[in-house]
Amino acid sequence: MVGKLVVLKIGEGSFEQGFPVTIQIGDENARPIVEITGELPPSPEIPRNYHRWQSIYRNLKLPSRPIALPKQIIPAPSLEDCQQVTEELKASFNTWLSSDGFRPIREKCLEKLISTDKIRVLLQTKDLRLQKLPWHLWDLLERYPDAEIALSAPAYEQVNRVASTSDRVKILAILGNSQGIDTQADKKLLELLPNADITFLVEPQSQDLTDRLWEQHWQILFFAGHSSTVEANLTGKIYINQTESLTVSQLKYALKKAVQRGLQLAIFNSCDGLGLAWEFADLQIPQIIVMREPVPDRVAEQFLKYFLAAFAEGESLYLAVRQARERLQALENQFPCATWLPVICQNPAEMPLTWHEFLKNTANIPKPARTVTHRLGFSVMLFLSMAIAGLSIGVRYLGVLQPLELSAFDQLLRSRPQEKPDSRLLVITITEEDVEAQPASERRGSLSERSLAQLLEKLAVYQPQAIGLDIYRDSGVNKDYPQLQKWMVESDRFVNVCRVSDPQTGKSGIAPPKQVPLKNLGFSNTLTDADNIVRRHYLALTPPPVSPCQASYSLSVQLALRYLYNKGMKLEFTPDGMWQLGKLRFKPLEAHTGGYQGIDALGHQILLNYRSSPSINAIAPQITLQDAIAGKLNAAAVKGKIVLIGTTAESFHDEWQTPFILQGNSQVISGVILQAQMVSQLLSAAIDGRPLLWSWSIWGEAIWIWFWSVIGCLLAWYIPRVGYLVVTVLIASVVLYSSCLIFLILFSGWIPLVPAALGLGSSAVSVVVFLNPNSRRIEEGRRQEAGGKRQLLGDSDRH
């Protein structure tokens, strides 16, 4: 019976936002017969339940094989505690896998698979938290007694290996630091294997281990002893003797050589091995068996005993692991969750071998690829364009191109046509002259309470819809101004500002006036990029408990919501947790969005769509504090509008850099103007339909970059003269820039410019360097061949 292969691909996401899922089902060694997509919904309780289980499990007093694994100082849990959290995690995990978004995948499995199938399930994800979950407890897998699940990295390749000429299975067995455990039991079990040539290294030195890996053709690598994973950087470590430990990276070259010489399987019968498997994935080893958590010594011995017995008798690697894992259930009264520990990590490009195939050793060794000579055509260009596009995307994903992409984005923003000022806003600026006009003894910052009370009294006459004070006032309101206190404490139209503490940057928070209720507060925290330019708009965040400012919404959001509520719009949340104002949906920024790569996307933030009309400072009508108090206010400019009050005095240094240029430098605007830009963005998007800035998905951007790489290849292939080619590539670059600008102007889309230009130019250069010389040699050979034929014909005539 042909086995079945099920590949479950879980894309980028999070437990807070959900995950996209794709499943492929087909026969082994064949293309998938079905592929469908689904999604796993947000479920923050899953990692919480897992960490709770892990904490209890790791603090059980079990004789295990970890070393240097810190234990939390908590009351020692009991076996009953572990069993309880185990059942809770299992229940919440299966509830998650029974969600509506995941149901099509479940139903497709039931449709295409039958209970007698031998099934390999590959879980392909780069999220370590997903890999740690007990996928073998998925109730769907329990329907299939001959199914086993393995972990797999999203990126993989097949390695050309040299076939062994030995008629015995070559095993290198490392018995490392045995402090507190019995590795000799593992040695005795290995010695029972039939047709095996085993070399044992007992607590070797690192030099000896490296030499052995280099010197012979190994098929199986075995390790017993202590190991651990450093979760901060996903580094696995094995302790080879009493004083030395090694990471996979420290054995990189020796292990690479071993893989090229035929290493097919690595078994780490030691603790906490997912870090080892994570690092081994880069070496493209076909299969690895590890323990996902600290493993008791008795459990490690019994698993090896059951696995080797089943594997040597002819069972497949997957079924041998499943049988051995399930037989550990008899130990769970003493060692909870023993069946959770063993897991396979699989390179999808390889087929797992049986013990008998290890002896043959040629069934799964790939043949060396034939060198392609003198064969040029579209397929070669297609491959070249894909390689260059993939390289561009990879370099971009690492953040190398981010400064260039942000600069290009700024240039596109500056190239847009101007817009009219937003008449729904009024900005009252406090200039240096306004500051000096106030008695120094009364001033609190740039604005005294007397001036603020007078200003609010003037504004109240004209009934503004909302007033935002973009000036910190971290003490209470003076009782000498009862009307001011009433405005700040009781009025729903007045919003005061404060600053939330940021533990990551070390910036302390600034408290609001003590009497102001939380609903009338908005935070002023602003996101700046590495070049100190503001390109993002903070909408909401979760303040740290110790922050003196506990506002969850920004000042701009608080003001916009008050204005929109009067227009019949209120903030709602979609089932997937997105914000919605009327028909407008807010898609928050993620770590990889547009040209941003690996940014801190905490909180709810979007791109800031500046309104450049006719200059960035002229976002809305403005009036100074003295003029406003003097009664020079225009009733039409205040009634039903949003009024922002803030300082523009340079002495207070409330200035922010923008993507716009003034006299060769980044144009700086005051904080109150920046707040006006943010408020205007929200009102314009919700009321006027002015789009928010957006970007394609990673796949959409990848296709766009690849498209321009193909264009570069085609231009270089069909335009052999370098001078003409340079001109044509420059014209194509102008078309690319114009396309990105049109997308931004018409649809507010941030389309990749720099990586697409890089793909265009690199593809053209690569074709000229690697392909055109070959084509010229072929053409020259054809001419020589034609000349030879003509010469032969001439010789025949003479005879």
Image: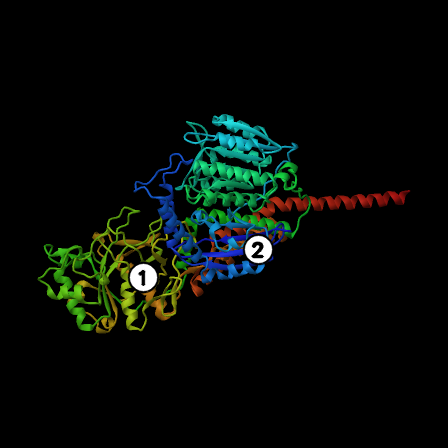
Q: Secondary structure at mark 1?
A: helix
Q: Secondary structure at mark 2?
A: loop
Classify mark 2: residues with Cα within 10 Å, few (<14), some (14-19) or many (20+).
Answer: some
Q: Amino acid at mark 1?
A: Met
Q: Foreground residue, 274 or 477?
A: 274
Q: Residue furthest left?
A: 480
For residue 347, which numbered disc appears in the image? none
Residue 497 image point, x, y percent: 23, 58
The answer to which quarter of the image holds residue 635 is bottom left
Residue 693 image point, x, y percent: 40, 61
Q: In the rendered image, which quarter contains the C terminus?
A: top right
Q: Where does label 2 land, which residue?
A: 115
Residue 225 image point, x, y percent: 46, 33
Classify mark 1: residues with Cα within 10 Å, few (<14), some (14-19) or many (20+).
Answer: many
- The residue under the point 57% across, 43% down is 317
Direction from residue 88 to residue 171 in the image, left or right = right
Height in image: 500 above or below 303? Answer: below
Q: Amino acid at mark 2?
A: Ser
- The residue under the point 27% across, 46% down is 506
For residue 678, which numbered disc appears in the image? 1
The answer to which quarter of the image holds residue 668 is bottom left
Asked whether residue 696 appears in the rendered view, the answer is: no
Q: Foreground residue, 369 or 637?
A: 369
